[in-house]
Amino acid sequence: MNQVKRSRSIAFHLIAAVLAVELLSSLLVGILSYGYERHIHFHAFDSILHGRVDSVIGAVQDAGDVDDNVMLDTADLHVPKDDIYEVFNSRGELLGRSPNWTGTSAPPAIPPHRHATFSEIKVNGREYRLLTQQGSRIVDPGDPGGGKLRHVTVIYGAPTERLWRAIHAAVQFYAAGSILLLAVTGPLIAWLLHRGLAPLRQLATLASRVSADSWHFSPPASARTTPELAPLTTAMENVLQRLERSFTQQRTFVSDAAHELKTAVAVVKSSLQLLGLRPRTQAEYQAGLERTLADTQRLEELVAKMLTLARVEDTGAAPGLPATVDLVQSMQQAAAELETVAKLHKIKVTMESPADEPVMVALTQEDCSLLLSNLLLNALQHSPPESTVELRTALQKERNTAEFSVRDHGEGIDPADLPRVFDRFYRSDPSRTRSTGGAGLGLAICKAVAERAGGSIALASQPGQGTTVTVQLPLTPNPDAASQLA
Amino acid sequence: MRVLLVEDEVRLADNLAAALRDGPGFAVDCAADGLSGDNLAGNRCYDLIILDLMLPRLDGLSLLRRLRARGDSTPVLILTAKEGKQAIIQLLNSGADDYLAKPFDLGELIARSKALIRRGKGQSHPVLSALGLEVNTLEQTVRRNGVLVDLSPTEYRILEYLIHHPRRVFSKRDLLEHLYDYNWEHHSNVIEAHVSNLRKKLDAAVPGAEPVIETLRGRGYRMAVGPEHTIEPG
């Protein structure tokens, strides 16, 4: 939680990104508007300069002298008083100049093929834009031959302060507009984001209500329909369902275990109290003590089985070395261990295995014998006298698995009970198996052992025909290491 | 008194049945699962049902609800390994009269069983009195006008059963049903013999006194409480 708080929120990032983009675009707008305004204003300004130059050329008059020279008559020339101008004849002699100007040092040269050039100059501390333009005047146009053409060069300048002021004003307007826009959109985006992220917050609120006691999680409709949130919502629902299932299983196990233990303790306690209820004979006490001892042994077995189950199911505890064991040998050992039980019930145990070949599986010797003897004992307990229990180990090399099966010819299991036979504490016939001491943990332990080794266990049964339990275990690659164990 | 014990743990059921037969002298029937418990309870001949919660085929709570749903008001004592207030509240609200958490004390179980039976028959005190008779259900002793009467266990049980409802007429069948479990051969002449012995012993205790047990021909027995008599409380 702390880490989440320390890093900046998504909303913060989004707002910052949007504002940065806005800032960048308003900068661009500023630069573009500056260029555009400059272009527009200068274009207009230059047109005005051309007009003024035309006015000045209009003021060039016939000097009336012998050489038909021209002169500048400023009497009718009306130009703004801040403007400056100079007029030269074709020989470069100054014809006239505005009174507020000392003039250029020499008549500017106009590059060939160009009618006019612009330049910038500073006069009296003010920026001027100068237009230097060629013009012509026909002297004595009424003379035969159409008069004489006289060329003049006009330099005309006007101050650009106002022009720049206008450009700056325009740019400032755009800049101010952009900043205002930024100021308005910042909070607006924040508000919109807040609204836009509402489904996420709703989802979080509802998700935070989920706890080990209350697994109910109904995501808001908005979270389900929002494309960005739908995968998250689905994932959360799935995770919660799985968690709830495993929590419920765990809770059921604890509750079942408590029930079993308390019942077993209740048996011992009641046996003792029954004995003390009234004075009894020596023989009665003797029998009572024996019964109580048997009850205590059953309690002890129950505890041992529960601890075994806890150990086998504790997948977190990694086995030290990758263990391997020969399934065939373990099968023979289990059969030998339970030989007396089999004889007691007059049951024949047959074994079948691949000849002269060890079948190595990834189990410790302890777990393997636990698995096999549990299955065999189970089969023996459910077999009628004079019947056969068949043990079989087989190799399935193409699937790289070993298969071990135990088949009995007992009463079989009710199909209704089949799905639950591997459940912890599950007994298909409680009163009967309880009297034989079963706690309903044997098959659960077998399942845990098989699954821990990466294998699986399955049970097939036909009522009246018998039951077959089949364990599939992956083969281990190196059979050499196991021969030492054996 | 006849008790139905529904408990799937065979050894525990054995012990409880033995204790209830040995101690207060109840007749006890055992059922190892919920459905057979339900079947037995359907006979309506029990004065108390002791019910385990975790049962195969039909769990204790469902069995209890079935009982109450069909209007069976037999007192029910629950044996539970569950913990937590909620589970107990749910039990009591479903019609249980009392509960005991496993592992329980056998003496407590017997005491609670007796109390539930007593309450179920409208009596609150463990010493029941009528017609100068005083039946102490704790000591299992009987006095008439202060004189101790020595009774056999069966005679005591008959008297105890009758005195819980001093005005009611009990048929032989009633007595058979409530005093013997299913393991007994049902012969009504057994009852006749026991009642006859009981009457003789009670009348012999105080010479010249009125008989305390009436025989109503074809109907059964009752305590001989005439209209002029009142039952002294406790």
Image (cartoon, grey):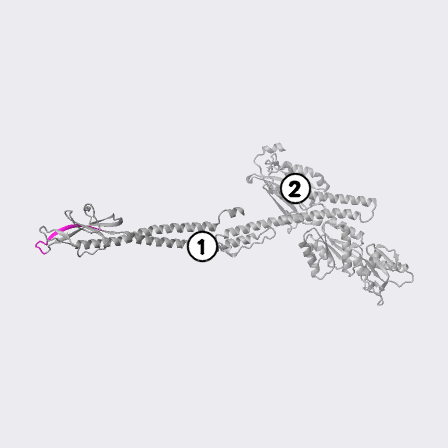
Classify mark 1: helix, strand or loop: helix
In the rendered image, which quarter contains the C terminus of chain B?
bottom right
Q: Chain of mark 1?
A: A
- Magenta highlight range: A142-156
**Residue in view at x 67 percent, y 38 percent:** A334
Residue type at mark 2 is Glu
Compare marks 2 and 1 and give the one earlier in the sequence.
Answer: 1
Does the image show residue A380?
no
Tag 2 residue: A390
User: In the drawing, does residue A144 fall left or right of residue A438?
Assistant: left
Residue type at mark 1 is Pro
Quick one: A99 or B99, which is closer to the camera?
A99
Q: Residue A289's image quarter?
A: top right
**Residue in view at x 9 percent, y 50 percent:** A67
Q: Residue B185's image quarter?
A: bottom right
Q: Indicate whether residue A306 is drawn in magenta.
A: no
Classify mark 2: helix, strand or loop: strand
Q: Residue furthest bottom?
A: B227
For disc 2, the neighbor class at 10 Å (few under 14, some 14 to 19, many from 20) is some
Q: Residue furthest top?
A: A484
Q: Position of residue A158 (x, y in %)?
A: 24, 52
Q: Are marks 2 and 1 in contact (CB under 8 Å)?
A: no
Tag 1 residue: A187
